[in-house]
Image: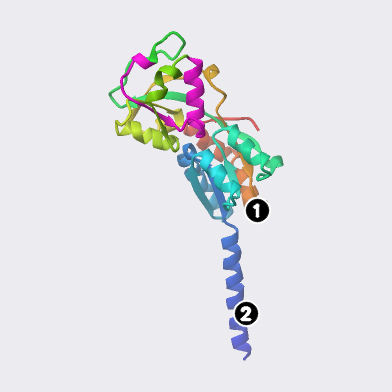
Amino acid sequence: MKALLKTLLRALALYWLAAGAASADVAVYAAASLTNALTDIVREFEHGYKSHVKLSFGSSAALAKQIEQGAPADVFISADLKWMDYLDGKGKIDQASRLNLLGNTLVLIAPQGKGFPVTLEKGFDLPAAFTGKLCAGEVNSVPVGLYAREALTHLGWWEGLKSRVVGAEDVRSALNFVERGECDTGIVYETDAKQSQKVEIIGRFPKDSHAPIVYPAALVTQSRDAKAYLAYLKKKPAREVFARYGFTVLGQ
């Protein structure tokens, strides 16, 4: 009887350990442009902290809406301030944990070998420089699309191009359209363009043509492991990964 009891107690202990490990998972909802960098960072974090991280990537707009509706996120990392502000206004993030983590650069791309001369400044006629479509994120919600529309408007090209702009669900989708040649050109982040062997960067938008590209991060829950993960993103190993992928690492 005692042996059976010990066996049952051991099994129960293992059950609760397993349940505890499962509940310790960190669910990270992050902008699609962070896919490569965060995937690399997670490997190191999991090894050192013995905590499993589940990464969900997509448009910041879509992820923010999912979190608003109760999606089980522990950490949210947006590609712009708008959608973090949105969740902040809904009381869905821990405001005290919020930080501006990274910056990026907006670039104009074309399929590899099909680039054309451009000058990304007022006075140049970009609509006349190519005849096909321009891919970006959806210009009313997806961060890269919002930045793109703002830059095109600032430089005087929006009215001439708006009927040819294809709004993708996120920056990686816009990149894929250009890779496949379905768009003659596209507007994406420099970090995404550099991950592709199928596109070339033909111009960088002036920083004053759009709002600064800022990636804010914040806790959605008070999970101990989520706090450890967010803190890790500020540490040197994570910062080095972000820098290697071309992100501007912002001061803490």
Q: Is residue 31 above or below residue 4?
A: above
Q: Is residue 221 above or below residue 8?
A: above
> What stretch of residues is rendered in magenta?
127-155
Circles 1 and 2 in contact, beta carbons < 8 Å: no
Q: Amino acid at mark 1?
A: Ser
Q: Quadrant of residue 174?
A: top left
Say which label, 1 or 2, has the lower sequence index: 2
Q: Is residue 23 above or below residue 209?
A: below
Q: Amino acid at mark 2?
A: Leu
Q: Which residue is at 54% across, 46% downward?
A: 29
Label 1, label 2: how far apart the Cα atoms are: 28 Å
Measured from the top left, where is residue 132 in percent x and y? 31, 23
What is the number of the mark on residue 132? none
Disc 1: CA contacts within 10 A as few (<14), some (14-19) or many (>=20): some
What is the number of the mark on residue 9? 2
- Towards the viewer: 53 or 179: 179
Q: Quadrant of residue 21?
A: bottom right
Q: Which color mode does the image show?
A: rainbow
| Camera sees residue 173 | yes
Judging by the rendered image, the residue that carries numbered circle 1 is 223
Disc 2: CA contacts within 10 A as few (<14), some (14-19) or many (>=20): few
Measured from the top left, where is residue 95 in percent x and y? 70, 40
Q: Is residue 41 left or right of residue 125?
A: right
Q: Which image quarter holds the C terminus?
A: top right
Q: Which residue is at 40% across, 20% downward?
A: 161
Q: Which residue is at 58% across, 72% downward?
A: 14
Measured from the top left, where is residue 47 in percent x and y? 53, 52
Circle 2: element type = helix
Q: Is residue 90 left or right of residue 50?
A: right
Q: Which residue is at 57% across, 67% downward?
A: 18
Q: Quadrant of residue 5?
A: bottom right
